[in-house]
Amino acid sequence: MVNKGSFVYQIFIKFQIGAHKQNFMRVTVSTTLDKRRISSKGYPLKLRITNNGISSYISMKLYMTDEEYETYSTKKRLPQNLKTIKQKLVQAEAKAIKLLNNMEEYNFQKFKDQYLGVKPKEVKKVVLSDLFQQRIDFFKKKEKFNTSISYNSTLQAINRFRKGIKIQEVDYKLLEDFQTFLLSENKSITTVSIYMRAFKAVVNANKELFKIHPFKKYKIPQARNNKRAISEDSIKKVLSHQFNIEVFNFYLDLYRFSFYSGGINVKDMVLLKKTNVHGDYLIYHRAKTNRPIKIYLLPQAKEIIDKYADTKGFIFPILDNEEAEHIYKKVNSLTIKINYTLERVCEELKIPKITTYSARHSFATVLMNKGVSIAFISKALGHSNTIITENYLDSFTNEQMKEDMMKLI
């Protein structure tokens, strides 16, 4: 049976694994000829394990040329070299099926180690901090600096709690004790939730090391939706505020632009180029989700763009280049400066403290309170669906409901 794809030729018949085991109902074994790369020996043959539509591969150290593959798939009588390959493939598939049938729960890495004869890691020698460091290094290589910093903050907290924690010590009780420790450090529920989600992700990435998944019993605390928006009257005061020091006005201009442009976040704003302006519209892709955003440019937003129009390729004079680490450092530094500026504004106006994120919430809340549809707000914010937007605005809609109900009396 031959099934040709854009990169891979699939050969042989797939075998259904362990139909009597619920977890294995969709696990199949096949061998493939990988046409993406070629060596002097030909194309590599790989063992493919597919579970619920997700395929993983193991190199078999066997090769075929196009001519050999054509002979193999069309001729009944095979030359000796192809007979030998066929025998090895049949043995490989039989071995894979046997291993999979003996597994209590499908895990590709565990299967691969067993198939290749790799000895499992000595759990006693594995320290939790090493697993965290692996994830931190992974995210740095992927240039996901914010994520790596979040994991590093969690690791530092774990080391303050207890150094040298071994894998076999990680259980429900340890997670509860770690949560109590974080709260004793006056960490908010939001911070505890962030740390514990990072902890769980590290466990999930290495779950073959745990006899019992510690998070099956432990539940991560959910932070309440803290209101970040401010009243419409207060937002008007902030937007019209002026400093005597020009650099503060620049940071305030960035906040104004965010508010007037659909609550665009700092990173997306920093990356904006003149080419993102199309007449009366701003069109860009969110860095976080890569979703396309199209926003009508209000006169106030256009005025801010024109104010800084003498910069080179970017709308705002912030970036010197587009290297990931440079962007990360600039965005982080700029966010701190804008927040400091907003803190000064709020002190002068005697209103509750706000941050850069309030522009996004305030944009959404003001539109909602004026009767604009959730669908439009959702699209402007770049949410994948209106349910996310409704959750996003939940704490504000309750407040608005109270005001509307009070109109009855």
Image (cartoon, rainbow, N blue to C red):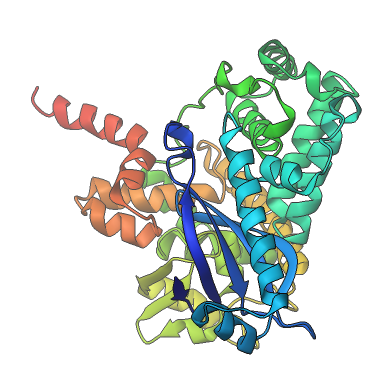
| Residue at 67% across, 36% down | 198
Name the quadrant of the N terminus.
bottom left
Residue 61 visible within the image: yes
- 354 is higher (above) or lower (below) than 48: above
| Residue at 32% across, 61% down | 379
Residue 106 visible within the image: no
Q: Residue furthest left?
A: 408
The one nearer the camera, 72 or 136, is 72
Judged left or right of residue 303, residue 156 is right
The one nearer the camera, 357 or 145, is 145
Judged left or right of residue 274, residue 152 is right
| Residue at 32% across, 55% down | 378
How many marks the image carries: the answer is 0
Rendering coords of residue 3 (x, y %): 44, 73
The one nearer the camera, 268 or 8, is 8
The one nearer the camera, 120 or 195, is 120
